[in-house]
Image (cartoon, rainbow, N blue to C red):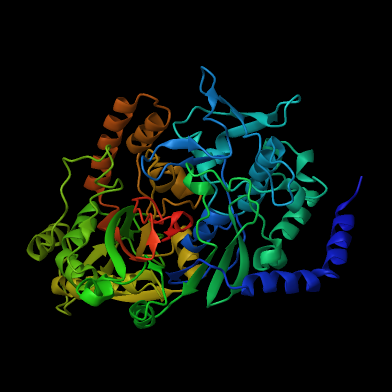
Amino acid sequence: MPDFRTFISMKLLLSSIIFLLVITFSISCQKKQEHTLIVQILNGPDNLHPFNNMTSQNNDLNLYTQLNLLRINYRTGLLEPCLAKVLAQKSDNGLNFSYELRNHIVWDDSSPITAYDIAFSFKAYLCFTSEKQNLNLIAQHIDDIIIDKKNNKKFTVKMKHPHMLNEWFWTSLPIIQETFYDKHKLLSRFNCSGIHDTNPTIKQWLSEFTSSENSQNPLFINGAGPYKICEWKKGESITLIKKKNYWAEYESENESLQSNPDSIILKIHTLPSNALEDLKNTSIDISTVIDFESFTKLSKDELFKKKYFLKLADTYNYIYVAMNMKPDGKNHQELFSDVAVRKAMALLTPYEQINKTLFANQGKRAIGPVPIFKHEFNWNLRPIKTNVAQAKAILKEAGWIDSDHDQLLDKVINGKKINLEFNINYLSGYKIGEEISKQISESMRQANIFVMLNPLDYFHFTNATYQHDFDMSISVWQGNAQPEDFSQLWHTKSWANNGLNFTGFGTATSDALIDSMNSCFNENKRINLSKRFQKIVYDNQPYIFLFAQTRRIIIKKKWENSEVYKGYPNVLLNTLRPKQ
C-alpha cells in the first residue's frame, strides 16, 4: 500500500512539468473571450481553497466553480436537487436520508462523480474544520455515509439526531473530487466518526490538502462547477473561464449549472471613487457593492441609466452591534451584564442619522434575528427608536451617575468604582462599520458615556470575538432562505465552546426553545416557537439590531436575464446572457 511519502514524491514529479502547464493555462486566460463579464468586488480572498468559506469572496468563487449535492432555489427559497437526482428518501424516524446521483455527471477529467466523492468531501470537511470554530453544527449530527455496494451512485446518510436542517447541510458543502485531492484514498480508511482522531496520517494529509499550493495556485483548484479559476492577480482580479464540453452545458433549468458568459473577471476596487469612475466609463459590467452615495448619484444620471439598470435588492443579512454579556471582569468590565444598560445602549443609537448619512434613507431596520420578509418573523415586535432622555433615565435607575462630576457616568460594582466607558471593535477597512461606530460614539457622549473606536484586522477581530475579548463588536450576519436554526448564534453551548454565541446570551428556557424548534417537523408549531424565541431575544437586547443590508445592483444593459434575488449574492453571474 502506498504511503504518504509516495504521494509527496508524485507531487514533486508533477512539479517538474508544472512550468508547461502554467504557460498553457496562462495562454488560455489571455485569449480574448467573446463575452466577458467584468464584475466589481471590494476585496479579494486570502486564498482560493473551496473549503475556506469564511468570507463572501470565497463563497462567490464556490458559486461558479463548485457544486453541491443540493441547492437552495433562489426564486422560491426551497430545497432542490443539484448533483442528486431528487431530494432524499427519508426513513420514518428522520435519521436516514437516501440519495442517488445523476447518471451523467463527470469531473473535468471525464471520470464519473460518485458517492465516494460525497463521502470524501464530508470527511475532508471534518478534517478542515476540526480545529476551527466554523464547523456547521449539522455536520456533528452525521453518523456515517453508507455507499451502496451494487451502485456507487447511491448512498445513505445516517444521522445521530433528528433535526429540521439535516438535509439543508448539503447546500453549503462543496463536493470535491477524491482522486484529485486524495490520490491514494487515505481518508477512505477512516469512517466519519473516526475522522476527528489525531491520527498522523490524517494530520499529514490535511497539511497537504491545505498547503499553499492547494490554496493559492489555480492549477490545484478543482471543482464540479461550470467555471474554473484561470488567473488570480492578488489585490487586482480573479478570472474565471467557462469550461469546454461541460457535462451540463445544455441544462438550462438548473441555474447552478448555467455558464452564459465565456469568462467572468472579478475586479477589485477598494476605493469607491475608482469604482464610480469605471462605471461611468462603462468598463464595469456589474456591481453589487457600490456605496449608497455613489448609487444615489448614478440613479439621478439620465445618461448613465441609458446604459445600466439600477436596482435595490433586499437581503437576508443584517448589521448588528454585539454586547459582551459575560465579561471576565478584568480586561472587560461588567457593563453589559445588566439588561437595563443594554437597552439604554439601543436607545442611544442614532438610527435615523445612520440611515440618512450611510444608506440614503433606504435602509430597512433589523428588529431581531429573523428578516422581516420571512414568514416566521414576529410582527408583534417593533423597531427601537432613538430616545436619549429615556436612556438616561434607565441608566440612572440602574445606578449609573456622574458621582465625581467628570462628565462620565460611573457605578460601584463589586466594591470598585467603574466608569461607563468601553471599546467598540470593528473590522479595519469596513467603512460602514467605522462610520457607524463613530456615530454611536458621538451619540453616547450625550449621556456622558465614552466610547473608544477599536479597528482590528481580520485575524485579530475574529479572534477577539470568539475569545469573548471585547466590549462591543460591530459586524454583519449573512443569512439565507432556509428555516432559522438559532443554535450557533444563540444557544449557551455555543458560548461555552467559543462558538458564534459570543455575547453569552441564553438561559435554560431559550435553550429549550431552540432544541424544540430543531426537532420540530410541524411547520406551524415551529414558527410559533420561533416567535416566542424572537421575543426573548428582543427583551434581553444582546445586540443592537441596526439595519437589514440592502444590495445596490448595477448591471450593464448589454446583459439580459438580470434577475435579482434576496439570497446572496443577489445576482447569479453565470446566468446573465449577452444580448444577441
Q: Residue furthest top?
A: 92
Q: Position of residue 450 (x, y in %)?
A: 24, 75
Residue at screen point 60% across, 66% down: 47
Q: Position of residue 80 (x, y in %)?
A: 47, 36
Residue at screen point 49% across, 44% down: 252
Q: Residue furthest front?
A: 580
- Residue 420: in sight, yes or no? yes
Quarter holding the C terminus? bottom left
Q: Quadrant of residue 424?
A: bottom left
Residue at screen point 17% across, 66% down: 361
Foreground: 343 or 337? 343
Residue at screen point 40% across, 48% down: 489
Q: Is residue 524 left or right of residue 229?
A: left
Q: Position of residue 294 (x, y in %)?
A: 27, 75
Q: Is residue 109 left or right of residue 423?
A: right
Q: Is residue 115 above or below residue 311?
A: above
Quarter holding the N terminus? top right
Q: Is residue 265 left or right of residue 196?
A: left
Total label count? 0
Q: Is residue 213 above or below residue 560?
A: below
Foreground: 258 or 57? 258
Q: Quadrant of residue 213?
A: bottom right
Q: Is residue 350 above or below residue 573?
A: below
Foreground: 146 or 520? 146
Q: Residue furthest right?
A: 1
Q: Position of residue 74 (x, y in %)?
A: 40, 45
Q: Quadrant of residue 341?
A: bottom left
Q: Is residue 9 left or right of residue 92?
A: right
